[in-house]
Amino acid sequence: MTESRVYLQPAYILRQRSYRESSLIFEAFTRDFGRISVLAKGVRKAKSKAQGLLQPFVPLRLTFLGKAELKTLTDVELAESFRPLSGFALYCGFYLNEVTAAFLHPDDPHPELFADYRQCLSDLQQLGALEAVLRNFELNLIEKTGYGLQLAYDAHHGRPVDPLKKYHLDADLSPVEAMDGIYTGNTLLAMQSRNFSEAEVLAEAKVLLRRVLDQLLHGKPLNSRKVLNEIIKRL
């Protein structure tokens, strides 16, 4: 049986590890095939032209073959020019990759989320409101992988969220009005519309989305989150 070959698939590397003396195994987020594992033979040799390309945050086009879970890379090229991440944005990028890999199932395509990921990297490269960029992507990630958050309606009381009131999230991650709520209705509505311009909204959104991500990932730790928090404390 001949092996299937995929040509010039848009992709980004999420993480990688050395394999034997001169090869790499990496996980890539591809536009049409989702998260895949790829063996890149011999790319760590001194004369390899691919080694410099096979890095996180680089827009790539991959050609690979194989029907098994582990594909074999046959060619790689740069998809477009890009600006490398640096400083705090670089650590944000590592968090972006870790949380994306944690949510994606192997071989489950999400072309719309791929576009969101690409846009998030572009926004991080602009060195603007980086935390707002991450919060926006986290919401997109939750939505596009099938979980979704409805933050504008209090289903328990059967009414829209009031910007002047306070809320908890229930076990289903839906807002419930409560006198001792830790999230303002204003924050919930701002998040629903992806508006992170207010400092209070950004602070509450970080707490809320951490709760949501932890629940959806069943408590699986995100190591890059710890690093980001330590950096933020020193800023």
Image (spheres, rainbow, N blue to C red):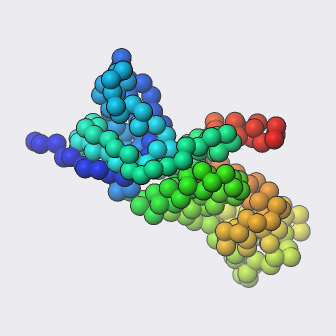
Seen at 65% across and 48% down, the residue is 214
Q: Which residue is drawn at the image coordinates 71% and 56% (left, top)?
A: 129
Task: Give the residue at x 25% y 38%.
Answer: 74
Above or below, comparing residue 47 to residue 147 in the picture: above
- Which percent across, then down, holds residue 77? 34, 44
Q: Is the N terminus in the top left, top right, bottom left or bottom right quadrant?
A: top left
Residue 147 seen from this side: no
Label count reads 0
Residue at 16% from the left image edge and 42% from the top image edge: 3
The x, y position of residue 28, in whole percent, is 41, 43
* Residue 140 visible to the viewer: yes
Of residues 126 and 170, the one nearer the viewer is: 126
The outermost residue toward the right is 179
Of residues 124 and 72, the one drawn nearer to the viewer in this rendering: 124
Task: Please name whichever residue, 9 or 58, is drawn nearer the observer in this view of the structure.
Answer: 58
Q: Residue furthest bottom?
A: 159
Q: Is residue 154 left or right of residue 114?
A: right
Q: Quadrant of residue 25?
A: top left
- Residue at the farthest top position: 21
Image position, residue 185 (x, y; %): 80, 72
Image location of residue 40, percent across then percent down = 32, 32
Taking the image as shown, residue 66 lies to the left or right of residue 115, namely left
What quarter of the picture does the C terminus occupy? top right
